[in-house]
Image (tube, grey):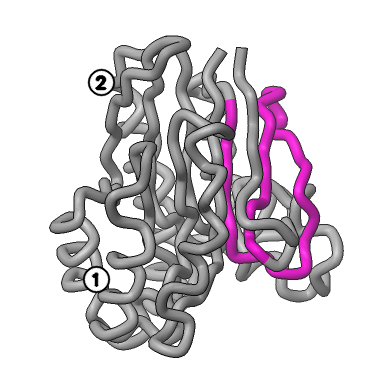
């Protein structure tokens, strides 16, 4: 068995320096790895990125992250990722990584993802160049997730995204904004890979539990949804 801790949408800034780390005292007893599902900063500034790197460095378990839309706000996403990597945090953007856990080898495929919507109620690659570009970006994100799974030689695989792969975990958000919270193409990539678990953030008013059409468990780990420092998920 492998145990995964996960949280997203912590939205750290200078005023929160040191405060979130205080909530991670039990991490070593709870999980084999910590996954961060994006929106780690409030406004995506370099200074906020430093806070994130400080909060999650030197923890007793490996830390793997993707960035979220907030982390792109100030066009400093590359610097934020660089600061995190310098502190030993693995930041994924269309790649996969392997962690050797006591219960086996864990493979994590990660990508931010993007919006588009869900089957029957989604944007289409038709019309203006701007709409085509929007949909192509979502298709590209899902394809990069699909490719990230392929080289993973692991006993257990997990998808880590910021945007939601299913609408189940959006319940509680206004239905009008569902297309801006995720994409069914992410779920298709997850099902193709036959992943064991998928975690995401982004939907602050959503719900924790969902499932892909192929039967993969999906968990919305946005901090406002969890109401606890991180969710813990055991995978046989």
Q: Is residue 106 left or right of residue 3?
A: left
Horizontal side of residue 27 vs 143, given as left or right: right
Which residue has dot 2 on it?
A: 151
Q: Which residue is mark 1?
A: 80
Q: Return the x and y of residue 235 as percentages of the image width and height.
A: 61, 19
Nearest the eye: 141 or 125: 141
- The residue shown at (27%, 85%) is 47
Q: Residue at x 19, y 56 (%)?
A: 87
Of discs 2 and 1, which sits in the foreground?
1
User: What segment is highlighted magenta in the picture?
Assistant: 197-223
- The quadrant of the rendering that contains the C terminus is top right
> Dot 1, how many residues are within 10 Å of its Cα: few (below 14), some (14-19), or many (20+)?
many
Judging depth in this view, the residue of 2 and 112 nearest the camera is 2
199 in magenta: yes
Quadrant location of the N terminus in the rendered image: top right
- Relative to 95, say whether 43 is above or below: below
Is 175 placed above or below 207 here? below
Front residue (pair 217, 27): 27
SS class of the residue under badge 2?
A: loop
- Give how far across and how far down residue 85 sits, in percent: 18, 55
Specify which label sits upstream in the sequence, 2 or 1.
Answer: 1
- Look at 53% across and 69% down and name the residue there: 10
Residue 90 located left or right of residue 79 = right
- Give 162 or 22, whichever is nearer the viewer: 22
CB under 8 Å between discs 2 and 1: no
* Quarter of the image where one finds residue 30: top right
Check disc 1 and report its element: helix, strand or loop.
helix
- Residue 145 is covered by the magenta coloring: no
Q: CA distance from mark 2 to mark 1?
A: 26 Å
How many neighbours does mark 2 have within 10 angstroms: few (below 14), some (14-19), or many (20 or more)? few
Residue that appears at 46% across and 29% down:
32
The location of residue 45, given as percent across then percent down, is 30, 86
């Amino acid at each position: 068995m492998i145990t995964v801790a996960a949280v997203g949408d912590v939205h750290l800034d200078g005023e929160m320096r040191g405060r979130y780390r205080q909530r991670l005292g039990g991490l070593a007893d709870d999980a084999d790895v910590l996954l961060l599902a994006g929106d780690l900063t409030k406004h995506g500034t370099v200074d906020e990125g430093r806070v994130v790197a400080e909060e999650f460095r030197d923890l007793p378990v490996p830390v793997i992250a993707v960035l979220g839309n907030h982390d792109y706000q100030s066009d400093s996403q590359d610097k934020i990722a660089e600061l995190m990597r310098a502190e030993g945090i693995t930041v994924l953007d269309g790649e996969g990584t392997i962690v050797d856990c006591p219960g086996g080898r864990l493979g994590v495929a990660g990508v931010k993802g993007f919006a588009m919507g869900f089957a029957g109620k989604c944007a289409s690659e038709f019309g203006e160049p701007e709409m085509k570009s929007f949909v192509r970006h979502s298709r590209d994100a899902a394809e990069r997730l699909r490719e990230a799974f392929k080289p993973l030689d692991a006993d257990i695989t997990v998808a880590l995204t910021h945007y939601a792969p299913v609408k189940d975990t959006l319940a509680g958000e206004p239905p009008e904004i569902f297309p801006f919270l995720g994409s069914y193409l992410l779920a298709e990539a997850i099902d193709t890979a036959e992943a064991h678990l998928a975690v995401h953030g982004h939907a602050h008013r959503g719900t924790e539990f969902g499932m892909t059409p192929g039967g993969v468990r999906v968990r919305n780990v946005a901090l406002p949804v969890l109401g606890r420092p991180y969710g813990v998920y055991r995978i046989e």
